[in-house]
Image: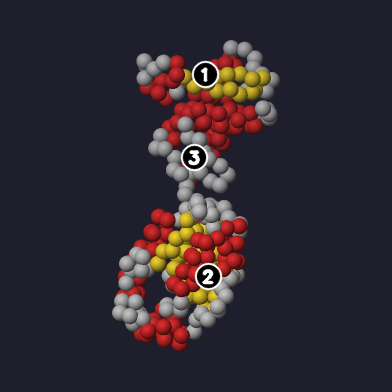
Amino acid sequence: MALITISGYPSSGKSTRAAQIHDFLSSTSSPQLKVKVISDDDLAVDRVSYDDSLQEKIARATLFTAITRHIAKDTILIVDGMNYIKGFRYQLYCKAREAGVRVATVYVLATPDQCQKWNDERGDGKRYKPQTLDALIQRFEEPSSMVRWDAPLFTIAWDDPTPPLERISDAVTTGIVKPPNVGTQITPKAPTDALRTLEHTTNALVSALMAVQGAGPLGGPIVLTIDSLEHSSNTSANDSSVLRVRLTLPHRALTLSELQRLKRQFVAARRKAVTLGSTEKGRVEWGEEGVGRAFAEFLEEGLGVAR
């Protein structure tokens, strides 16, 4: 459903705002919709983790793993943390697009003095060291509504008695779901025998075409029959290992050089797909039947024949 990223200085009241948003969405959403908050406390990440850069990276990785595990189309996930690095917020944005859920950023705004006061009032284990607090505030990269990974952005002052809960709810329940782009898609890989299947199927179809043409004039729809790879390597294979491909041919003689040229163009394009995987233009079929059907359509287009 949605990913809500809470951002702000340490000890700025982010958990309070996260709880308000959680309670509001829980009371106004359908019972089938889950509303969940993930925070450092939930993941047993101690404040001392932010004293050391390596430990902080481990803490962020722990948070990202939890987000990946819980993000779903039936869940509004509220990430209660500083999320002060814009690169990390962009990473969350990409994960949300990959999962097909809406996004929103809530920036809890408080002065450094107010954060220092609240930090001093916290008990042991919940308090940042003074030098750590100062360093985190200095490194904080403020969210901006001008960049896509922070938008839509809702800024809530620490003393605001009426946070825009309804606007946040509208954004995460009725806002636009941005589709995944090439950079956020998981690219499926071709099977290990994809190139072998490609070469065998296209070569066999070209040979079958030339053989049929040698028996008499061609033109119109025909069905070519070729041995599949299984049939070629197994002499006891039955008729189920024979591949039949339908295509329509022009009413003229075809030359071997013409068919080989079209085959090379088709194979070159498919080789690129084997290397890079599927693209946003659609799924690539790797099996013999899929390759045969795609090659037949490619031949028809190259020969100027419309189905």
Any part of residue 152 in sight: no
Query: Which residue was labeled with disc 1?
Result: 225
Which mark is drawn over residue 271? 3
Which amino acid does the dot numbered 2 rest on? Answer: Val
| Eye-nearest disc, 2 or 1 | 2
Earlier residue among tags 3 and 2? 2
Position of 3 relative to 238 (above/below):
below
Q: Secondary structure at mark 1?
A: strand
Q: Specify few, some or many for label 3: CA neighbours under 10 Å numbering under 14, 14-19, or 20 or more.
A: some
Q: Secondary structure at mark 3?
A: helix
Position of 64 relative to 186 (above/below):
below
Q: CA distance from mark 1 to mark 3?
A: 24 Å
Which amino acid does the dot numbered 1 rest on? Answer: Thr
User: Residue 232, position in %: x, y?
Assistant: 40, 21
Which mark is drawn over residue 106? 2
Residue at 40%, 55% in the rendered image: 69
Q: Quadrant of residue 299?
A: top right
User: Residue 99, position in %: x, y?
Assistant: 49, 53
Earlier residue among tags 2 and 1? 2
Q: CA distance from mark 2 to mark 1?
A: 62 Å
Say which of 202 and 26 sits in front.
26
